[in-house]
Amino acid sequence: MKYLSYCRPDGRASFGRTDGNEVIDLRGSGPVADLRAALEAGVLHDLQDGESFKLSQLVLLPPIPNPGKILCVGLNYETHRKETGRAAANHPAIFTRFADTLIAHRASLVRPKVSTDFDYEGELAVVIGKGGRAIPRDSALSHVAGYACFNDASVRDWQRHNIQFTPGKNFPGTGGFGPWMVTPDEVGQLAARNVVTRLNDQIVQSQSVAEMIWPVPEIIAYISVFTALAAGDVIATGTPGGVGSKRVPPLWMKAGDSISVEIEGIGQLINNVVDET
């Protein structure tokens, strides 16, 4: 099943499920106001069908517009680790992104005024459906509500101001997320899926999820030791090699560009790029 968040034609924020070009609204059928609340209450799959809309009638929001936490994994593909020149590590590199950086499918990524070093990072995002602390690796996937596409767009010079990634990862309008969340039963074998990033229709990244250094169960188990995961939290699992900053010459995103992240069986996230005004 595909679940998505959006603004209805009347302007009200809502959520629902989609099959093809039709969206079934779910907000009116229960006591929950948004997709995160439905996950927290454990009622998402029990909600009754409401109004029906055409997908083209709606303005999409990030699948979870208001996650309590967004945790991102750095250097999680060997190709990317090698192109950065970083040493191999014994544990995943974890950093945070703020919820107010998120944008939806077809919204604009914003290149900030202070930099032209604006890079793409196509990724698989994991949405937590059931919270927990110190979650065992063997049961970690039972805590997953679904998967989505993510573009962890990075302002590279600000990322490198010091050893912490935070400044370069939290400019407004730099976290593409969407277009929807797909439940694990529909995704099937996650390891068989490729993350493909296209800049202006040219493939710039393409790698199998199976080639992650730390697969999804390990990431969930590791993170949940130092912080309790909650329903609606989002984990961006890292980007493959091929980022623009490591090309010669560097390949930066600029105003007028189109960038997409596609994962077979999950969807295609498309954003254009604009300059900050």
Image (tube, grey):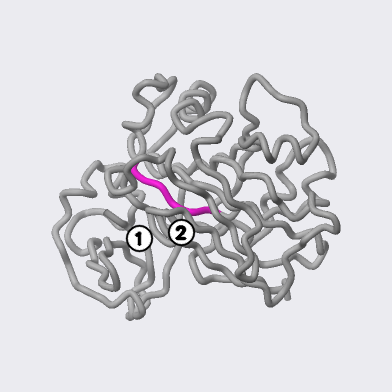
Q: Amino acid at mark 1?
A: Leu
Callout 1 crowding tier (Cα within 10 Å): few <14, some 14–19, many ≥20? many
Most frequent secondary structure within the magenta stretch: strand
Query: Where are the magenta residues, as a range?
Result: 145-150
The percent position of residue 118, horizontal first and vertical second, equals 75, 60
Q: CA distance from mark 1 to mark 2?
A: 8 Å
The quarter of the displayed image where residue 176 is located: bottom right
Query: In the displayed structure, does residue 186 sit left or right of residue 69?
Result: left
Q: Earlier in the sequence, mark 1 or mark 2?
A: 1
Residue placed most toward the observer, 88 or 137: 88
Is residue 267 on the magenta stretch?
Answer: no
Marks 1/2 in contact by CB < 8 Å: the verdict is yes
Callout 2 crowding tier (Cα within 10 Å): few <14, some 14–19, many ≥20? many
Q: Amino acid at mark 2?
A: Gly
Q: Secondary structure at mark 2?
A: strand
* Residue 111 position (above or below residue 164): below
Is residue 147 on the magenta stretch?
Answer: yes
The percent position of residue 55, horizontal first and vertical second, equals 33, 74
The quarter of the displayed image where residue 120 is located: bottom right
Q: Identify residue for label 1.
A: 4
Quadrant in which the C terminus appears: bottom right
Can residue 101 be seen here? The reply is no
Residue at 29% of width from left, 49% of height from top? 186
* Residue 138 position (above or below residue 265): above
Q: In the rendering, which numbered label is found on residue 178?
A: 2
